[in-house]
């Protein structure tokens, strides 16, 4: 049994990680300030005696030190996501994503944790034109959010080299699945579209719908995090990995699948029209990950394509969004 800390553990990815590791028999501590996470995401976690919730903020060094006490592995998921949010409020995004990240690195170093596994981002690729995206070829960032996530990687590398802290960064590509929040100004596109279609409202796609993404189901992401913790391959640590399925679909493709799968629950959804608007500032046209590095060094083998993941996600949303 390992003692695990998940920062941002009440969020979408964080709460799924908490549940997974608890079910595997580990002891899990969740640190969250509930700025974007929700306590209802932790309902199953509270059923375990091996679960502990700390309501605190990664911008507070005392909270960070308290959370890492006695911890073996840190899964750092806490961050303010969203490119538009960072454009609207770059100061807070930087404060949480950079200063908070540094606080956690220092706390992890001082507590002698075994490994620090953190959420990186595909936004780090910036204006790089090449496809598929390969870990060691990036461009210039296109948003404040992208800058903060790249700085995370730089800090992690320095802490590995200078202090000997083992780190692994996972560049998430458009993660989706159960527990992803459809509400709020910065809601992710898939749960937002699902909720609108369920209510027979017309979703609006930014642009003409031909932008493409490497949509990645949550269970693939959990597999990557688990592999990052368990690897004993020295070559596999102190580096970053694309965390994706390794395929891309356009937003129009996505909408077609969503309408198809949701129509099985309500045939009227198939008749809902789609609206289109201007492209969003800071968005890249296309995203596709090479997952060769993760396959070779971590044994990564993603099980869920976009379509397979959407079927699972839609079934969950149909029950939980009503």
Image: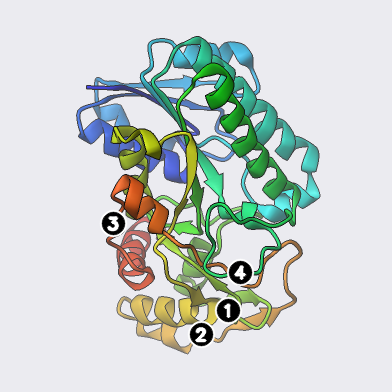
Of mark 2 and mark 3, the one earlier in the sequence is 2
Q: Are marks 1 and 4 in contact (CB under 8 Å)?
A: no
Of mark 1 and mark 3, the one earlier in the sequence is 1
Q: Are marks 1 and 3 in contact (CB under 8 Å)?
A: no
Q: CA distance from mark 4 to mark 3?
A: 23 Å
Of mark 2 and mark 1, the one earlier in the sequence is 1
Q: Nearer the viewer, mark 1 or mark 3?
A: 3
Per the image, label 1 sits on a secondary structure element best described as loop
Q: Quadrant of the N terminus?
A: top left
Q: CA distance from mark 1 to mark 3?
A: 36 Å
Per the image, label 4 sits on a secondary structure element best described as loop
Residue 104 drawn above or below residue 279: above
Task: Identify the residue at horizontal 55%, vertical 64% (top origin).
Answer: 189
Q: CA distance from mark 1 to mark 4?
A: 33 Å
Residue 165 drawn above or below residue 154: above
The residue beneath circle 4 is 130
The residue beneath circle 2 is 272
The residue beneath circle 1 is 202
Q: CA distance from mark 2 to mark 1?
A: 6 Å
**Any mark on residue 300, and which?**
none
């Amino acid at each position: 049994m390992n003692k695990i800390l998940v920062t941002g553990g009440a969020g979408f990815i964080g709460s799924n990680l908490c549940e997974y590791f608890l079910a595997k028999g580990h002891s899990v501590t969740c640190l969250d300030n509930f700025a974007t996470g929700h306590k209802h995401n932790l309902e199953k976690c509270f059923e375990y005696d091996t679960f502990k919730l700390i309501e605190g903020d990664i911008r507070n060094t005392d909270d960070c030190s308290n959370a890492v006490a006695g911890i073996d592995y840190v899964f750092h998921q806490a961050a303010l996501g969203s490119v538009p949010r960072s454009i609207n409020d770059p100061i807070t995004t930087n404060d949480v994503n950079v200063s908070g990240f540094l606080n956690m690195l220092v706390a992890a170093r001082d507590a002698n944790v075994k490994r620090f596994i953190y959420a990186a981002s595909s936004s780090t690729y910036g204006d790089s034109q090449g496809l598929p995206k390969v870990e060691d070829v990036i461009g210039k960032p296109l948003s404040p959010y992208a800058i903060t996530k790249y700085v995370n990687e730089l800090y992690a590398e320095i802490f590995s080299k200078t202090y000997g802290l083992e780190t692994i960064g996972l560049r998430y590509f458009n993660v989706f699945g159960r527990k992803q929040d459809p509400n709020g100004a910065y809601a992710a596109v898939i749960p937002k579209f699902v909720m609108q279609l369920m209510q027979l409202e017309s979703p609006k796609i930014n642009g003409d719908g031909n932008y493409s993404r490497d949509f990645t189901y949550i269970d693939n992401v959990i597999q990557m995090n688990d592999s990052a913790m368990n690897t004993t391959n020295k070559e596999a640590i102190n580096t970053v990995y694309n965390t994706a399925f390794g395929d891309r679909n356009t937003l129009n493709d996505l909408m077609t699948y969503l309408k198809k799968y949701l129509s099985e629950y309500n045939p009227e959804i198939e008749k809902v029209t789609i609206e289109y608007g201007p492209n969003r500032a800071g968005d890249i046209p296309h995203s596709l990950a090479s997952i060769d590095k993760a396959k070779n060094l971590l044994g990564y083998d993603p099980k869920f394509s976009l379509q397979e993941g959407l079927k699972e996600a839609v079934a969950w949303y149909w029950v939980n969004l009503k």
